[in-house]
Image: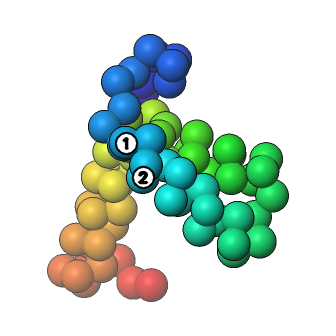
Amino acid sequence: MNTQPLELLTDTTSVDDVATETKVLAQGGFSEDEIMSLCWLRQWYQHGGSDRVEVVRRLEFLKHLVKHGKIEL
């Protein structure tokens, strides 16, 4: 899990892209706090802030078992 603070990471998203995303979210009815949370979550997931690899491996294994008739849904 990546625990490095987001402020220390170099972001590849330009300021114009963030401004555009923010405007679109605001037009969609999101509050300022919700927009900030969504932008933070996007950054978090883009920079590997979750342990999603382990979850994906387990889901792929379950999919394999179902596909080969080892377990039923």
- Left/right placement of residue 43 relative to residue 14 reads right
Marks counted in the figure total 2
| Residue with the most extreme front position | 16
- Left/right placement of residue 41 relative to residue 67 reads right
| Residue with the most extreme left position | 68
User: What is the x, y in percent for residue 20?
Assistant: 50, 59
Q: Residue flagged by tag 1: what amino acid is it? A: Ser
Residue at the spot x=45%, y=34% of the render? 49
Q: Which mark is residue 17?
A: 2
What crowding class fits label 1: few (fewer than 14 Cα within 10 Å), some (14-19), or many (20 or more)?
A: few
Residue at the spot x=39%, y=21% of the render? 9
Q: Which mark is residue 14?
A: 1
Q: Is residue 45 visible?
A: no
Residue at the spot x=30%, y=79% of the render? 66
Q: Residue flagged by tag 2: what amino acid is it? A: Asp
Q: Residue 3 carries which label?
A: none
* Contact, mark 2 vs mark 1 (Cβ under 8 Å): yes
Image quadrant where one finds the C terminus: bottom left
User: What is the x, y in percent for residue 58?
Assistant: 34, 54
Q: Can residue 16 be seen in this view?
A: yes
